[in-house]
Image: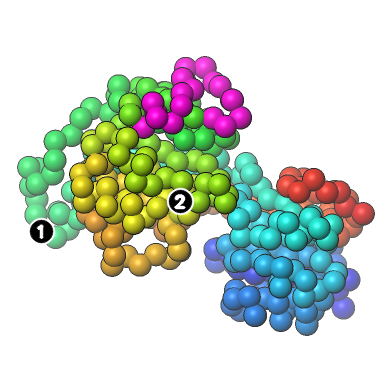
Amino acid sequence: MAKFHVLLTDYAWEELEIEKQVLIDNDVQLIVAPANDEETLASLAKEHQVDAIMTNWAQVTQKVISASSNVKIVARLGIGLDNIDMDYCTSKGILVTNTPDYCLIEVAEHTLALIFACARKVAMYHHETMSGTYDLSAGPAMRRMEGQTLGIVGLGNIGVKLAKKAKCLGLNVLATSRSGKTIEGVETVDMDRLLAESDFVSLLIPATPETKKSFGAEQFKKMKPTAYLINTARGAIIDHDALAAALDAGEIAGAALDVQDPEPCDLTIAPYNDPRVIVTPHAAFVSVESLENMRSRVSRQVVDCLLGKTPENVRNGLTAG
C-alpha cells in the first residue's frame, strides 16, 4: 500500500504518465476523480483520506479540502488560483502552489494570434469561404498592423512577453501596471488613456473579487469604435452582457475570447454567437512543451511537500513541516 494518496480533481490532457511516474517513484498513489463536482471530490477525499489535492480547473472548496484531515497541499495545475479556497487553506496551514511561469510564451503567442486574426479578418474570411463565398469585398476595410497601438491591461509576466513580441512586430505598446512595473519601449499609462488610444486592448490581469466584471459598459464606451478586445486572462473579468451591448451599439469593432464565464459557454447566445467575436476554448496555455513542464513541476511540488520540504511557488506564504 502506498504511503501517500493524492486526489487529482480534473485534467485537460490525454494521459497521466508524467504525473504517475513522479508520484509512484515516491510511494504516492494517484486517485483520479471520475467527475469534478463538489460531492464527488469530497467523497473521494474522505474515502482515501488524501494527503494532497492536485487540480486543474475544478472548484476546490472548503468542503472538498476539509473532507480529509491529512491534506497538506493543494497544487494548481496552472496559474490562476481563483478555483481554490485560499483563505481556508491558509487558516489550516495547507500550502497552495501553482506554476506561474510555465506558459508565458504560449499565452503571449495566442494573444498575438488573436490580435492578428481580428485585424486581418482571418476567422471571418475562413467562415465565408468554407460557406461558399469567395469574395474579398465581403469583409470590412483592413488597416496595416504595423504602427497600430496595443494596450496591455496588466504588465505581469505574460504582459511583458507580449509587449516585447508586439514591439518586434512594429506595434506601439501602452500598458497599465498595478505594481508600477516598467519596461523599455512601453509607456505605462492610466486606464482611460489606454482605452482611448489603443486599437487592440489585451486583458492580462488575474480574476479576483476586485476584478470580477471590472471590464464593462464604462470601459467599452471609452474604447475606439474600431478597436478590438482580446481576453486571454479569465472570463470573469468581462461583463459579457455589456460586451454584447457594446457590439450592438458599435462601440467596439469586435472581440477575441479565449476565456469565458462560465466555461464552456453557451455558443448560441451573444456575445459568443456574434460574427465579430472569435472564441477559442481556453487554449492559450497549451503546447507540448508547456504541459510537460507544468505537469512534472506540480507533481514534484506535491512530492516535496509530502516529504517535508517546502516546494516551489507557495502562494499563501506557508512552509512545509
Q: Nearer the viewer, mark 2 or mark 1?
A: 2
Q: Is residue 157 visible?
A: yes
Is 86 displayed left or right of 156 in the figure? right
**Circle 1 residue:** 132
Eyeballing the image, is 278 above or below 273? above
- Percent from the top left, x then y, of residue 291? 58, 53
* Secondary structure category for the residue under label 2: loop
Give the residue displayed 51% in from the left and 35% down from the top.
154
Give the residue displayed 79% in from the left and 55% down from the top.
90
Q: Residue furthest top?
A: 184
Is 309 displayed left or right of 114 in the figure? right
Magenta residues, start to end: 177-195
Callout 2: 10 Å neighbours few (<14), some, many (20+)? some
**Circle 2 residue:** 213
Q: On the image, which quarter does residue 270 sit in? A: bottom left
Is residue 178 one of those drawn in magenta?
A: yes
Quadrant housing the C terminus: bottom right
* Secondary structure category for the residue under label 1: loop
- Percent from the top left, x then y, of residue 305? 84, 55
Eyeballing the image, is 88 above or below 257? below
Looking at numbered disc 1 in the image, what kind of residue is underneath it?
Answer: Gly
